[in-house]
Amino acid sequence: MLFFQSLISGILIGGVYALAAMGMSLVFGVMNISNFAHGELMMLGMYMAYYLFTLLNIDPFLSLLIIMPLTFVFGYVIEKTMIDRVMDHPSENQILLTVGFGLIMSNSALLAFTSDPKILTTSYSSSSIALPGGISVSIPMLLSFLVTCILTAALYLFLAKSRTGMALRATSQNREAAQLMGINVSRMSAIAFGTGTLLAASAGAMIAQTYYIDPFAGHIFLLKSFTICVLGGLGSVIGAGIGGIIIGLAEAMSSAYLSSDWKDVLVFILFLAILLLRPQGLFGKKGEQ
Amino acid sequence: MKQSVVVIALFAAVMAALPGFLGDNPYIADILITILMMASLASAWNIVGGYAGQFSFGHAAYFGAGAYTTSILLTTLNPGIPVSIAAGVLVSCVIALLTGTIVFRLRGHYFALASIAVAEIVRLTVLNLDITGGAQGILVTKVSFGSLDLNSKVPFYYAMLFLLLVTLGISALIYRSRTGYYLLAIREDQDAAASLGINLYLFKNIALVISAAIASVAGSIYAVYISFIDTSTVLPLRLSIEIILTTIIGGIGTLWGPVLGAVLLVSLAEALRSNMIGEYLVNTGMVSEGSATGAFLKSNLAHAHVLVYGIITVLCILGLPKGILGFFRRKGEA
């Protein structure tokens, strides 16, 4: 029974990891930038959900309708005003810029909201569905998994069918060629970063009921998102989706059968193992590294 | 080379005489020791990050490995300080070699990402083991070294100064040596470097190991100095990032940039932490004390030094990507 319980909770949490990692992978694919402020963007989503709920009494899942457009615009503006200026700098400078931006975000949050962890409690926060065999499924986690599926499908349709989505994929495959085909690659970068921000913040808003909300809550998710992106192949959005589920499962299984103290260590060891054995990731093409 | 030797010697003479002028003020001594430590760490980072262009985001791991190995040995077997420091260097070099072996075959962002992963593995392992004291940390007391009074700050000042001078010496030596030219070639264009017969894998590892060894010694000295270590003081990601920022802000790839960065950032952090800046703004009448801004600055600026680091980093990357020293030098002069 422990196995099935871990299986279900692993898949559910993996879905949220996947959502955050897809945002990072999209940014990496289109812009070739590792976004070290990704965890802070999740933290932003957590606080937005928290304050929309406590001040305006909007359900965290409904508040996504407000959070998504706002964070998209936020990401778009950040890209246009800061990151666009370093697009042709060495990658280290790009990383440092996002590190600096992340420090500004987390420490501004520290000033604004203090370091006391906040807890978002709705009427259904701790309720769960009991399945036969003593397995329980947490309602907020189930809801966030369902919303994640909807968002993933929407993202997939957007990337596969819409003109902008095709332009994004073209930019991701070959920036110069895309530009020669008349695609405004600078605008694509801003859209990719905006979408990445939106996905990170949505993932944050959805786990706001499950995790403590504090200014540095995003840190651990930054590292997990990196692991997932590398596992799925850097830049592969689908790979990030599947990678998220795998990492969620690996974590749930290791805390069930090993100990929860070591589950994060296991994730990072897995990360190094992938780099050693299959650096292009499970779904990346060989030679891309 | 001659010029570097003269400048380093001059710097050594001034710094060695400094405690004599400042008298016995423990507060100033503590700030100076922190500056020397950050300058050593940033200079060490500069060898692998600045010269070889391989950005390590996990240097806290080497600092922490040194601090922990030394503390554990001193509180258990107690083989003396020099052996304990050497053991720390050994552990750090092993961690560095493991990281380098796995990651230096890859290019681009992978090293940056993997260095964080390794640092997190080290931090979480230390946190979960018993021998390291877990979250409680280790109290390093009853340590002696010859007839030195380890309750005074003076020996630690000279120890950190000595480490910094050695680090600067090694940096200057590497910079002017064949190895240094190889590292710069790797930084500028890996393919071109490889086509000239430079073993990328070997030389990146050499740079990383030297850098890790220095960071480890800094950690060991720090542990004995501060007498208490835990994961949040010697192994946090924040420390790794502060080391990078110090180098970047001072001037990456230059000999004196990391030292300049350490002087500026440590002083700035101290000025903010002691609320000197907040009080200055209020006292000079730039911000009135009764106003909301005044009250906000006075109560919060003390906690804002990391925020200020972030702002400086962003401005630095957007405005002075080569750091302060790099800005004043012509291109190509390094």
Image (cartoon, grey):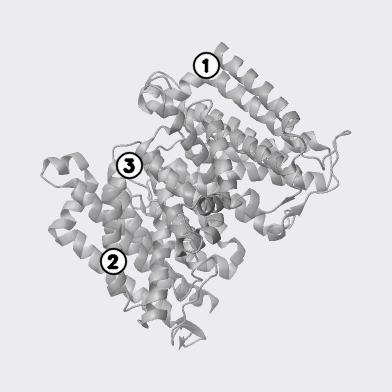
Q: CA distance from mark 3 to mark 1?
A: 35 Å
At horizontal 37% and vertical 62% (from top left) the residue drawn is A20
Q: Secondary structure at mark 1?
A: loop
Which residue type carries mark 2? Leu
- Residue found at the far top of this picture: B2
**B41 or B99: which is nearer to us?**
B41
**Circle 3 sits on which residue?**
A288
- Tags 2 and 3 on a common chain: yes
**B295 or B258: which is nearer to us?**
B295
- Tags 3 and 1 on a common chain: no
Give the foreground label among 1 and 2: 2
The crowding category of the residue bearing disc 3, from other C-alpha atoms within 10 Å (few below 14, some 14 to 19, many at least 20), is few
Q: CA distance from mark 1 to mark 2?
A: 53 Å
Q: Left or right of A22: which side holds A274?
A: right
Disc 2 sits on a residue from what chain?
A
Residue A70's label in the rendered image is 2
Residue B9: x %, y % from top left: 64, 18
Give the foreground label among 3 and 1: 1
At horizontal 14% and vertical 61% (from top left) the residue drawn is A162
Determine which quarter of the picture holds residue A178: top left
Which residue type carries mark 3? Glu
**Circle 1 sits on which residue?**
B176
